[in-house]
Image (cartoon, rainbow, N blue to C red):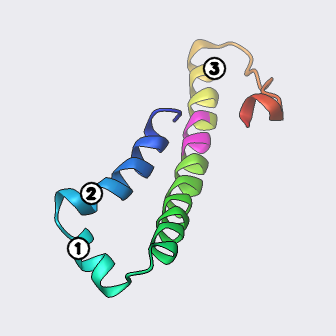
Amino acid sequence: MTITLPIIAVLSVTSEWSQSSGLTTFTLVPHRGRVVPAKAVAAVLVTVPATAVAFAFGAVGNVIGTALADIPAVWDQSLVEVG
């Protein structure tokens, strides 16, 4: 996740320039102060659910893996480590 999520943010900013849609965006909304925060909000709206899904897959994988290996499940992540 530490590699994937920054890539999502970078692609959301740079994809406009590779597709030449940035010209249209800044022609329709010439104030960059409105476009940049909108992109930040969009990146957060993608990142938060992606993180929740990743945690859910990790929890399910922990349960299935411990059941298959017949070992006790370990849930010892602190909030600091999760953050």
Q: CA distance from mark 3 to mark 1?
A: 52 Å
Residue 32, labelled with which disc?
Answer: none
Front-lying residue, 28 or 40: 28
Q: Amino acid at mark 2?
A: Ser
The answer to whether the residues at label 3 and label 1 have Cβ atoms under 8 Å apart is no
Residue ID at (73%, 37%): 83
Q: Quadrant of residue 26?
A: bottom left
Q: CA distance from mark 2 to mark 1?
A: 12 Å
Vertical order, 6 against 27 (above or below): above
Q: Residue 46: x and y, percent? A: 49, 59
The disc, 2 or 3, on the residue closer to the chain's N-terminal end is 2
Q: Secondary structure at mark 2?
A: helix
Residue ID at (46%, 33%): 3
Q: Residue 27: x and y, percent? A: 28, 83
**Pointer 2: residues within 10 angstroms few (<14), some, or many (20+)?**
few
Residue 23, labelled with which disc?
Answer: 1
> Magenta span covers which residues?
54-58
Which residue is under mark 2? 15
Q: Amino acid at mark 1?
A: Leu
Which residue is under mark 3? 66
Q: Quadrant of residue 12?
A: bottom left
Q: Amino acid at mark 3?
A: Thr
Q: CA distance from mark 2 to mark 3?
A: 41 Å
Vertical order, 4 against 31 (above or below): above
Q: Secondary structure at mark 3?
A: helix
Judged by depth in the image, the label closer to the viewer, 3 or 1, is: 1
**Pointer 3: residues within 10 angstroms few (<14), some, or many (20+)?**
some
Front-lying residue, 56 or 26: 26
**Residue lying at the far left of the rendered structure:** 19
